[in-house]
Amino acid sequence: MADWFEHLNQLGLPGGCIAVEITEGLLLDNSSIVADKLLAFKDAGMQTSLDDFGTGYSSLSYLKKYHIDFLKIDQAFVSNLVANSTDMALCEAIVVMAHVLGMKVIAEGVETEEQRDLLLKAGCDYAQGYFFSKAVCADEFEKLFPIKQSQSTASG
């Protein structure tokens, strides 16, 4: 963990450049090690996402105990998402709960325009899935967002 902090410092980057994604299963470990590491991430400015929220051994007490920045709605709730469905009610409930607790929400597995629109209407903050892009390797990702060299770098 210290290596991440050192690496960021060497690059001159703030902790907010890293988002740590954890699963609910990790929070089942009630040891101080998990709490200490999550606190260290927070102190370094890193953000934490709780992945697959609602599909594991969810305990709302975890949301109070640990500093979590994002809840990720599992694709199991998104894949059959239609208006007035149970999945829609669950997504809306997760969004409202997260917002009241000061967290942002990320929906996983968004594949259609209808899913995106329903999640936007529910107030979901972010979404990921094939609707936006298929999974790509690092080289392909860099081509999607080319970094323009400054004039001094290009000529130097």
Image: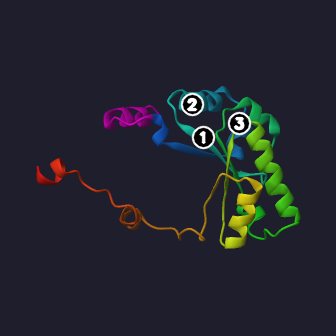
Check if residue 16 falls in the magenta segment. no
- Residue type at mark 3 is Gly
Would residue 28 be found to the left or right of residue 35 on screen? right
Q: Which residues are magenta?
A: 1-14
> Which residue is labeled 3 in the image?
102
Type of the residue with mark 2: Lys
* Residue 57 appears in view: no
Picture quarter containing residue 102?
A: top right
Give residue 42's mark.
2
With respect to residue 113, does 73 lie above or below?
above
Front disc: 2 or 3: 3
Residue drawn where x is 37% and y is 62% of the image:
142
Q: Nearer the viewer, residue 19 or 92?
A: 92
The x, y position of residue 136, in whole percent, is 46, 68
- The answer to if 9 sits in the magenta stretch is yes
Label 3: how many Cα within 10 Å (few below 14, some 14–19, many 20+): few
